Image (cartoon, rainbow, N blue to C red):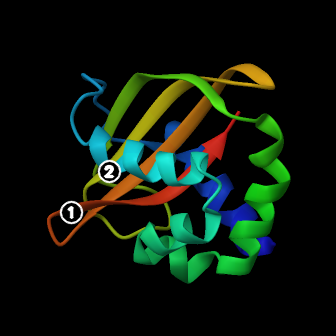
Amino acid sequence: MKNIIVVLCLFISTLTWAQTLKVVDVATEIAPATSWLEVVDSGKYANSWQQAGVFFQENVPKALWVSKLEEVRAPLGKVQSRQGISRQELTAIPQLPDGEYVILEFQTDFENKADSIETVTLKKSAEQWQVIGYFIQ
């Protein structure tokens, strides 16, 4: 439980600590995030953990991830609409090694909660973008 809270808080704090911030078109790097979100949307929470990046897997145990998504995400219901609203490129995030990061925000209407904001954080690893953080407001 402590690990997931630390991971979620870390990604919330990235918005405040970002030193090299650039907001541009959401289209770039969106495919890995939306593919991963489709796995979450389908309720395959264990698969979403398996498809996440190494940092995520090392800091959030699979069983904890699955139980938290069942607790938080499942009650929201099916996605009615999802639209990218921002994209931020970062090279430094506190408590993470320097690298290439992208934070994507989506305005999402769920069956049981409209006007939600989903934040997906990706890290470039071996020339691939991998999800290392997910947060719903």
29 to the left or right of 123:
left
Query: Who's the residue at 32% across and 50% down the image?
Result: 32
- Which corner quadrant holds the N terminus? bottom right
Of residues 77 and 85, the one drawn nearer to the viewer in this rendering: 77
- Mark 2 = which residue? 32
Residue type at the position of mark 2: Pro
Q: Residue 100 appears at what percent x and percent y? A: 25, 56
Residue located at (52% from left, 71% from top):
56
- In this view, 62 is above or below 23: below
Residue 35: give its label: none
Q: Which mark is residue 128?
A: 1
58 to 109, vertically: above or below? below
For badge 1, the amino acid type reads Gln
Q: Nearer the viewer, residue 116 or 6?
A: 116
- Left/right placement of residue 75 relative to residue 26 reads right
Whole-angstrom CA distance, mark 2 to mark 1, is: 9 Å
